[in-house]
Amino acid sequence: MLWLAGLSAAFSQESPIVVGAVISQTGTLAELATEYEKGIQLWRDEVNAAGGLLGRRVELLVLDDASQAVRTGPLYARLIKEDKADLLIGPYGSAATLIAASEAERARRVMINGAGQAAAVHARAPKFVFQSAIPYSAYGEGVLQVAGEAGYRKLFIVAREDPASQEMAEATHSAAAQEFSAGSIEGYRPGTLDFAAQVAKARAAGAEAWIAFGDVRDAAEMVKTFKRLDYAPQLFIARAASHPRFIALLGQDAEFSLGAVDFDPRVGEAARSFAKAYAAKWTVAPGLPAAEGYAAGTVLGAGVRNAGTLEQQRLATTLAAMEVPTVLGNYKVAYQNGAQIGAKPVVVQIRKGRPEPGNPLLPYPKWNERALIR
């Protein structure tokens, strides 16, 4: 094991590269944010096992914002000015990332936006902030492709009245303008249990595809309403239909629904390898937050290797132009603002109780044509 001794000696002679991040370790976001941090930690461990970055060991310095976005800015300022972090990874959540991005941009320090999905983070065209997370605006791309290939042109878009769902719906509606007829977006309040009014509007409009953005319970209640009213659009997709709870709430009535998966460990070699390594280290399967953390590290590491330096302007130029595969899909950003344009959710269909990628079976069957699955 002489090579290990040599590697250790080399690491001891060079100061480590410090990667700073503000990640909620207490408060309401702590459970999800902790998983995000574990994904980053796994990336760090793998990088160090392979010789580090630029021949130097990577250290992770994490500060806690207690799930309060307003605390994020001062903490990133501390990482930059006092702790002298060499590189930055953004916090968990869009609100905190928006504040962190402003601090990084002001200091002209590169930051990877690993878990800020809202468009607002990149609306001011930052030059030092780069998004590895899948943006909310990408959630309708896959289903529009499915609908277009199936020849469905009349869309009915419904969205829960929350910022994330509304942003997904608005981006989908805008993208559909050239090829589809979509009408206006139908909003509904959180906690809605009866979608009869929306079904009546969809029927009157002759909608072929029902596209829904909301939570798992909303999607399940839509299907229950469909069955009660004997309504079956030719295509039904709800973003949350890929969640295991959707199937638990509906049983066999969940069949043939389409959903959008942000991270699927079965899709792509990078995702499969990551899921195996994460489970070995933490004894649980990774979810989306873990994949987001790992992807952020992957992009940051690739940027440093490609740039061959920690000089911030050169690193920023490299990150703006490069493409690299991640567990979330291909990293590629818009040069003008660093927003992700490569990675996007995978469309899946519930078949025999599991969300399956690949070509979906269409149309969505009528209720009197369904058979029990044994």
Image (cartoon, rainbow, N blue to C red):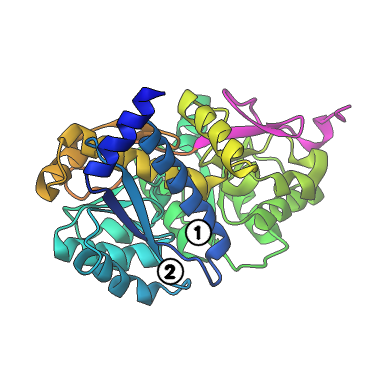
Residue annotated with mark 1? 33
Residue 283 is covered by the magenta coloring: no
Give the amino acid type for the residue marked by disc 2 in the picture.
Asp
Q: Nearer the viewer, residue 34 or 159?
A: 34
Is residue 332 among what the camera can see? no
The residue range painted magenta reads 346-374
Percent coordinates x, y for residue 114 in the rendering? 38, 50
User: In front: mark 1 or mark 2?
Assistant: 2
Question: Residue shown at 36%/53% (left/top)?
Answer: 60
Residue annotated with mark 2? 64
Lower sequence index among marks 1 and 2? 1
SS for dot 1? helix
Question: Residue shown at 54%/72% (left/top)?
Answer: 27
Residue 366 is covered by the magenta coloring: yes
Give the quarter of the image for residue 84: bottom left
Percent coordinates x, y for residue 116 in the rendering? 38, 56
Question: Residue shown at 29%/72% (left/top)?
Answer: 73
282 sits to left or right of 90: right
Give the amino acid type for the residue marked by disc 1 in the picture.
Ala
Instruction: Give the CA separation, mark 1 to mark 2.
Output: 10 Å
Q: Are marks 1 and 2 in contact (CB under 8 Å)?
A: no
Give the quarter of the image for residue 364: top right
- From the viewer's perspective, is residue 74 above or below residue 174? below
Is residue 202 among what the camera can see? yes
12 sits to left or right of 189: left
Give the quarter of the image for residue 93: bottom left
Count all numbered tags in the image, as a single digit.
2
Q: Quadrant of the N terminus?
A: top left
- From the viewer's perspective, is residue 358 above or below residue 366? above
Question: Residue shown at 57%/47% (left/top)?
Answer: 239
